[in-house]
């Protein structure tokens, strides 16, 4: 499928994802078959930043709202899988131009699950699993997610590196 040509612009869809860690396993979820992007593929929770994630709040300084990505990620994870997360740490970032020409910037993070039980948001996902890095290979993950899980595993061991293909 040919991607549409886009004009250089400052406007991107911004999304943030969480590799959630609990009991040395990672939470993955299967996207609903009705989703427009990556239907039926396995991924990690997350979603798009909305202006409501900061516009309705008082600014932290005269000009700025801080922690907007962290706030977005906590909201998205709570909505999508019902968990409270903490200890959010940056892992990597990626960009994509979707088939409809919309450019996306995705910030990938890891976080600890601190409370709650997994409750899937209807229409978003239809299955979940807590997996080890080795077990994750058995799932039809969106391309690149396994490599992000690998990075998270290494970060937990104190090894920080940029994204690279692992399999």
Image: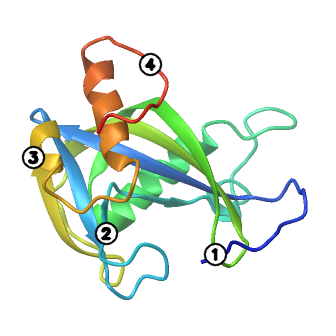
What's the image's color scheme? rainbow
Asked which secondary structure carries label 1, the reply is loop
The residue labelled by disc 2 is 41
Q: Looking at the image, is mark 1 or mark 3 earlier in the sequence?
A: 1
Q: Looking at the image, is mark 1 or mark 4 earlier in the sequence?
A: 1
The residue labelled by disc 3 is 135
Give whichever of 4, 13 is nearer the camera. Answer: 4
Mark 3 neighbour class, 10 Å CA radius: few under 14, some 14 to 19, many 20 or more: few
Q: Could you give the CA–CA distance between mark 2 and mark 1, rounded to whole angstroms?
A: 17 Å
Tell me where residue 163 appears, x and y as whole percent.
47, 31
Q: Looking at the image, is mark 2 or mark 1 earlier in the sequence?
A: 2
Q: Could you give the CA–CA distance between mark 4 and mark 3, rounded to whole angstroms?
A: 22 Å
Residue 85 visible within the image: no
The residue labelled by disc 1 is 99
Q: Is residue 165 left or right of residue 118?
A: right
Is the Cβ of the residue at disc 4 closer than 8 Å to that at disc 3? no
Q: Is residue 129 left or right of residue 8?
A: left
Asked which secondary structure carries label 2, the reply is loop
């Amino acid at each position: 499928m040919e991607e549409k040509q886009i004009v250089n612009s400052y406007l991107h869809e911004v999304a943030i994802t969480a590799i959630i860690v609990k009991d040395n396993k990672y939470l993955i979820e299967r996207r609903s078959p009705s989703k427009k992007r990556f239907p039926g593929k396995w991924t990690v929770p997350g979603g798009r930043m909305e202006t409501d994630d900061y516009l309705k709040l008082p600014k932290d300084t005269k000009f700025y709202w801080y922690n907007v990505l962290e706030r977005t990620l906590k909201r998205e994870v709570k909505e999508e899988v019902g968990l409270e997360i903490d200890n959010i740490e940056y892992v990597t970032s990626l960009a994509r131009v979707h088939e409809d020409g919309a450019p996306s910037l995705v910030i990938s993070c890891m976080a600890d699950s601190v409370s709650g039980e997994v409750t899937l948001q209807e229409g978003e996902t239809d299955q979940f699993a807590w997996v080890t890095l080795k077990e994750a290979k058995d799932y039809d993950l969106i391309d690149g997610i396994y490599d992000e899980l690998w990075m998270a595993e290494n970060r937990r061991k104190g090894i920080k590196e940029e994204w690279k293909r692992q399999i």
